[in-house]
Amino acid sequence: MQKVKSHFQLPILLWALLQIGCMRPSDTVSTSFYYWKTNFKLDPIEREALRATQTDRLFIRVMDVDTQGPQGEAIPISPVSFPEPLADSIAIVPVVFIVNAVLRDMSEDQLEDLAKNIRQFVNGKIKQAGKSAFEELQIDCDWTVSTKSAYFSLLEKLRSEIGESVRLTATLRLHQVRNIQSSGIPPVDRVLLMCYNMGNLRKPGPHNSIMDLNEMELYLKDFLHRYPLAVDIALPLFSWSVVFRDGAYAGISKRLDPDLLKDTALFQTDGHPTLFRLKKALPAAGLRKNDVIRREETHYSDLLAAADFLNTHRKPGDFALLFYHLDSQVLNEFPHEKLQAIQHRFN
């Protein structure tokens, strides 16, 4: 009996070794946040979120670039200020948002000047943040077919400006993953896929434009794993109130307390639980009688489902997981346990 047992042990052992050899090691997921406010100052809730998620770098929007100069030239808009420096334990990744219209009809010389101006401005902000250098520069731009050539040229010129030692990354929208032939592949080291603002914000109706799992599947299921660059991922934590006036998009209300939507003396539901019609003017929030508010929220269950989907369809490899964005009011809806649970979906 002992001899028979040993005959079975050898193939079982070989099979186990083959299985172990075929398993890939777990990918390393580094967690971070976007910081999108114009005044950098962390409160205790935000600091604790960094600690709980083991965040060691912040993606900080340092400026927008838009055509608001005296002659319509591209200039910095809403730059961030640093009344307090970043902690030594936190590295900065400067993010520059470029309005797509900036790139229209720009000559190569103008693109060269823009690249130099961006590099100089970023270097100044890095010093204000109390840092001597940065390891990554991220450019955020929803480029189109008509601006692709200028945008890619700008990225190449930025690469020359910052040198090879600094990683150059760019944001990526869902449609640019699926429509890779027309959108092209940006000349950068990595891309960061923005898994939010998926739907049509300006379209009336009860849909959620922040996150739509059906849209994510439509644009990514058969395409994400084929994308040729390394892909980092950003997920939303925010919610907002979208205003429609006389059937047309009128903006996002930043002054409306969402708790007021429950006040039946002010609002009545408008055919759907997420739509609210104002019964009387609300000047403090800049709203008029009969304005319709669509309340869009990011739900924890959707984030978990999105994380599972993305982890299934992304290519293997280490990557960064970002949350948009670091703000104590936003974090009140997502305590550390929830953020950590989303992180663990990728492990």
Image (tube, rainbow, N blue to C red):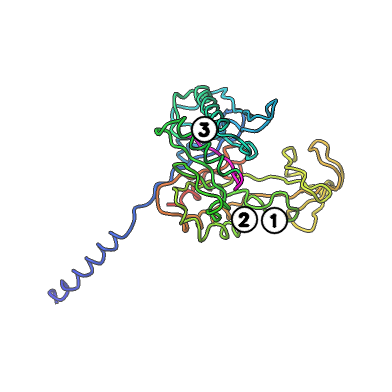
Residue 39 inside the magenta-drawn segment: no
Left or right: 255 in relation to 210: right
Say which mark, if any, is on residue 335. Answer: none
Where in the figure is residue 157, as x and y percent of width and height?
49, 34
Say which mark, if any, is on residue 94. Answer: 3
Can you tell which of label 1 and label 3 is closer to the viewer? 3
Q: Residue at x 64, y 50 (%)?
A: 210
Question: Is mark 1 in CB contact (under 8 Å) with mark 2?
Answer: yes
SS at badge 1? loop
Q: Amino acid at mark 3?
A: Pro
Question: Is mark 3 in CB contact (under 8 Å) with mark 2?
Answer: no
Mark 1 surroundings within 10 Å by alpha-carbon count, few (fewer than 14), some (14 through 19), many (20 or more): some
Disc 1 target residue: 207
- Up the image or down, 302 lies above or below 320; here it is below
Query: What's the CA distance linking mark 1 and mark 3?
Result: 33 Å
Q: Which residues are magenta?
A: 137-146
Residue 142 inside the magenta-drawn segment: yes
Q: Nearer the viewer, residue 202 or 15?
A: 202
Left or right: 101 in relation to 3: right
Sequence-earlier tag: 1 or 3: 3
Query: What's the CA distance linking mark 3 and mark 2?
Result: 28 Å
Where in the figure is residue 209, as x and y percent of width and height?
66, 51
Say which mark, if any, is on residue 212. Answer: 2
Q: Amino acid at mark 1?
A: His
